[in-house]
Amino acid sequence: MGKNLIFIYNLALIMIYSGIIWMSFLLFYWEREKKLLWTGIIFSAILMDDIVIFLSEMFENFADVYNKIFMIVPTHKTLIYMIVSLGYLTIFKRLLNRKIKKIDYVILTLYVVFMLFVPALKNSAWKIWLYFLPSQAYNLYLGITSFLTIKKNPEEFQDSFYLWCKRLFFLTIIFNILIVIEDTIVIFNFDTYSRFYINMNNRSTTSDILYLVYAGFTAAYITYYLKILLKNNRIVSSVTNCVKETFPSDIEDSLLYHFGENYHLTSREREILKVLLDDKTNQEISDDLYISLGTAKTHIHNIFQKIGVVKRPQLLEVYETYRSRQLTPEKKED
């Protein structure tokens, strides 16, 4: 690939990754949703990695220095792989509304420790292959477990949103297998690793394709998220007061806002809570807020978990207790 094509290709990647990063962090600032935070972190790590690879492709002197350092202390690559894998773990579990298990952290820790000790081996193709393998194996493990979670619980994951999640996990499985195959072919047939001379291809084409697939899924998710936010902003004023009392609406809104802040609810969850307190059904909430039924159920489940209740009457009781406690001083002053 000529230097001009390399420049154009990397410029396109940098623009795509930067756009995803900017939108992810901006939406996180608004919504405080950890999936968005980790999406921004993952693509920041991917962008940093691509810039280093870009420099190694454009400047031979930089490539020589980088390759020599990589063979001894590949700290840069290890940190990026650790961040990306931890991000995948967090996002995949949150998409499925599942808690991260200790075994997931244990396996992640073991693979990072393994990557730290591999550089101590003698320079060879096997050394590099063993260094890259754990990351792909762990990401493959996350893809398989997430895919099977949906497949084994069809009643829980009926919404069309989870069909896209299933496709995402399936592509994660396929591409991580392809990445291992590509690494095996390139490392053992095209790269050179010896004591005096190192010539390695730092770019994985299959990895680039996978990252672009993730960027596509992320762009679609962010677009969906923005559409819902815009629709919700238009209908918030039409939602009735959460408790039928004669207090001004700004007081009720203030109480609801601070109640949500107290239990660390996102702005989306506060909107759903407002409709929940009207004792509407899940389907009515879905219709009122222009969200899918599955998404409504997921948000309601998250609200219940954060507040520490399991039924709607308990939620109403908790809110009414909070509301009464906040309004009592005002009544006494009258």
Image: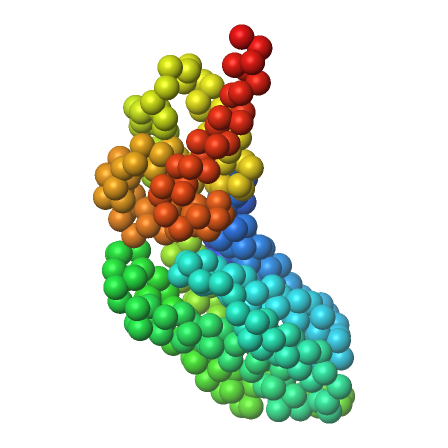
Residue closest to the eye, 205 or 34: 34
Q: Where residue 253 sits: x, y (%)? A: 45, 24
Residue closest to the eye, 255 or 59: 255
Is 310 drawn above or below residue 141 in the view shown? above
Residue closest to the eye, 36 or 130: 36
Decide if residue 16 is on the left or right side of residue 202. Answer: left
For the point 43% across and 79% down, the residue is 178
For the point 44% across and 48% down, the residue is 309
Colour treatment of the image: rainbow
Q: Is residue 56 visible?
A: no
Q: Where residue 245 sits: x, y (%)? A: 37, 19
Q: Where residue 97 sits: x, y (%)? A: 42, 59
* Count of labels in the image: 0
Decide if residue 138 is on the left or right side of residue 239. Answer: right
Decide if residue 329 is on the left or right side of residue 273. Answer: right
Q: Where residue 194 sits: x, y (%)? A: 71, 90
Is 25 drawn above or below residue 182 in the view shown? above
For the point 43% across and 80% down, the residue is 177
Residue closest to the eye, 130 or 201: 130
Q: Is residue 242 visible?
A: yes
Kindly indicate the quadrant of the structure image that contains residue 154. Answer: bottom left
Residue furthest to the top: 334
Kindly indicate the quadrant of the structure image that contains residue 122. Answer: bottom right
For the point 46% across and 76% down, the residue is 140
Is 42 drawn above or below residue 328 in the view shown? below
